[in-house]
Amino acid sequence: MPPARILFWAATISGIGLTARSVLAEPPPLPVAAAIAVVYVAILLSGVFVLRLRMFADAVVRGPDDATGVALTFDDGPDPVHTREVLDVLDKHGAKATFFVIGRKAEQHRDVVEEIVRRGHDVGVHGFAHDRLFSMRGSKRVRDDLERAIRVLENITGKTPLLFRPPIGHTNPTIARVADLLDLTTVGWSVRARDGLASTKPEDVVARISRGLEDGAIVLLHDAPEHGDRKPAGVTALPAILDKIASKNLRVTALSTWIDREV
């Protein structure tokens, strides 16, 4: 069990014990109770916002201990221009990647999704609407969104997607439970470049990614902006990133080879 999950359960059990003591005996002083509440909320929010802690979901955040190579992943596509540019660069370097696509965009650009698959890459679910408040939604809304995204990809590719990256990387017990029910493997990352931000420059992307390149690394990049048609800095930086990977005597490895299931 991940240490963060142990911390969460320990804090939860302690909170229940403190509540019982307050009812049956004497409540703690108000400042102490307030401090305990603040700490608990901080623990809870860290689990929501920081997927690599795996507090709520058994997410794949890097390769296994014996992993070799680096896995490249791309979020927020497909885009009819930028995704194809990424595909061309990957082809030139003989590299395979995983694209976590937004369902509504996949509906609009199904030909791009077909091209991703035809070129030998994996496709995963990134939600249908890419709801930035996904971690605040109820179970029904979360399930409806993911099921809709799954159906879109099934209709395009003829296969059921098995990989899932939560929108903006946020998760909670509800999202984790629904993902399990839908037989989705949640995937995080070990290194990111924040190339989804308009202010990020390609050289910043290369510098941030280079620091985390090692065997087993899962790299998060974007082949499309969340909204609009702006070109993410990661698309421009991709050739330099692939050169950096080669200069460190690493290779690009398909993420699916690190997951004990057929994708």
Image: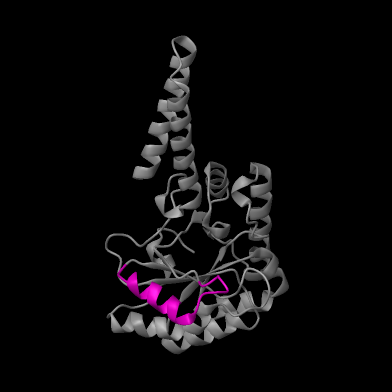
Residue at 57% in and 62% down: 161
Where is residue 232? Give x, y as percent.
Answer: 56, 77
Residue at 69% in and 75% down: 109
Compared with residue 137, is residue 151 higher up or lower down, i.e. above or below? Answer: below
Residue at 54% in and 51% down: 183
Location of the N terminus (image quadrant): top left
Residue placed most toward the observer, 183 or 171 = 171
Compared with residue 105, is residue 164 higher up or lower down, i.e. above or below? Answer: above
Compared with residue 147, is residue 95 higher up or lower down, i.e. above or below? Answer: below
Total numbered circles: 0
User: Which residue lies most toward the bottom here?
Assistant: 92
Q: Is residue 44 left or right of residue 226?
A: left
Compared with residue 46, is residue 200 higher up or lower down, i.e. above or below? Answer: below
Q: Which residues are the magenta region? A: 195-215
Residue at 38% in and 63% down: 258
Q: Find out whether residue 203 is within the magenta segment.
A: yes
Where is residue 170? Give x, y as percent.
Answer: 53, 53
Residue placed most toward the observer, 28 or 144 = 28
Quadrant of res 190: bottom left
Q: Is residue 206 left or right of residue 122?
A: left
Quadrant of res 230: bottom right
